Image: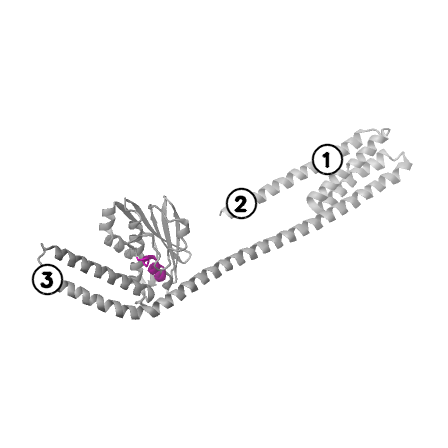
Amino acid sequence: MLVLAGGIVYKSDMRKNEIIRLLILVALVLVITSLHYLTTTQKVHFHDIYRRLYYIPIVLGGLWFTLRGGLATAIAVSVLFAPHVVFQWGHHPAADPEQYLEILLYNVIGFLTGFLAEKEKTQKVRYQKAAHRLEESYDKLKSQADQILEIEEQLRRADRLSALGQLSAGMAHEIRNPLGSIRGTAEILQEGIDPADRRYEFTCILIKEVDRLNKVVQNFLDFARPSAGDRDLVDVNRLLAEVLTLTGPPALKNGVTARLDAGAVPEMDGDGEQLKQAFLNLVLNALQAMPAGGSLDISTAASAGVLEIRFTDSGGGIPPEDLDRIFNPFFTTRDEGTGLGLAITHRIVQGHGGRIAVESRLGAGTTFLLTFPVNAV
């Protein structure tokens, strides 16, 4: 609508300019013609000046309205000037050839000026079209270059994931079996120790740390080899509501107000559990960014076959130098973090044919935008 309105205003301005120019030409021709008819033929020098003044509207007509304007102005001048030559200069036979030659020159100048202006206008339009095509080609090349860079980044991530996948099976077997044995032994030792004994606390710490290490291994496996999962129609708004219910206690503990603005969005094909895990990772990441309280706004919307999910927090933001690395595996700015939460989220979103983007300003908060095709498979 804005483009259409702008085009209408531009055409209206052009039309107004054309009317003003036409009025100027008419006024010039009428004024010069009046001077001819109101000045006696005895004042020859004045008439010579007036005849030359006719060239001004003729040239302007050609420049402003091209060939049509130049010829029309020249013909109008000829028609108005001819009676003056015939009736007022009829008793000066020596002056007739010069006067008629002047009329001929009016039409020649009108034609030449209009013809050259027409050529210039055509050339200008051709150059504008060429510039527009070059601009479109540049934008297309720039878009293709951005896509190539993005594909290269995805290929680099895929190479890293491939290496991680090859290591995951062996690591899972070699690490989880000893962890199970350690945890079982710790539980047996815990049963034989009085809870009042200080050693009981040590067994609790041992079990807790084993569970944490087991969780790290599980996150690693989830990232390196995410399961295909069962695809079905998923209600995104329902999944987000469940995530907010699940994270309600830690949000309340941190003093964070979480809100969901559920838009009218269609269901999408996907793995509900994987999507729920991705949303949970983003919410937990936001809560960790706001230890002293804040707000988390989640919204959903759909347009032009694309489903958008936006997570906006009021935390401290992400440093600009870290924005390109936050989705890399094992990159974290927290001492207790594993650096796999956002990497897993990125992998899940890509697995559903979607994209994830981040915008952040230090001290102003961070926004994660997830986009999915409505008919994601």
Q: Residue at x 40, y 66 (%)?
A: 159
Secondary structure beneath label 2: helix
Q: Which tag, 3 or 1, sits closer to the chain's start?
A: 1
Please give the residue where the numbered disc 2 appears in the rendered image. Answer: 6
Do callouts 2 and 1 mark residues in contact (Cβ within 8 Å)? no
Q: What is the crowding at mark 1: few (fewer than 14 residues within 10 Å), some, or many (at least 20)? A: some
Q: Is residue 375 visible?
A: no
Closer-to-camera residue (262/312)? 312
Closer-to-camera residue (91/265)? 265
Please give the residue where the numbered disc 3 appears in the rendered image. Answer: 191
Disc 3 versus disc 1: distance between alpha carbons? 112 Å
Say the numbered circle drawn on residue 28.
1
Q: Residue at x 81, y 37 (%)?
A: 83
Disc 2 versus disc 1: distance between alpha carbons? 33 Å
Q: What is the crowding at mark 2: few (fewer than 14 residues within 10 Å), some, or many (at least 20)? A: few
Kind of residue sitting beneath label 1: Leu
Left or right of 266, for residue 204 = left
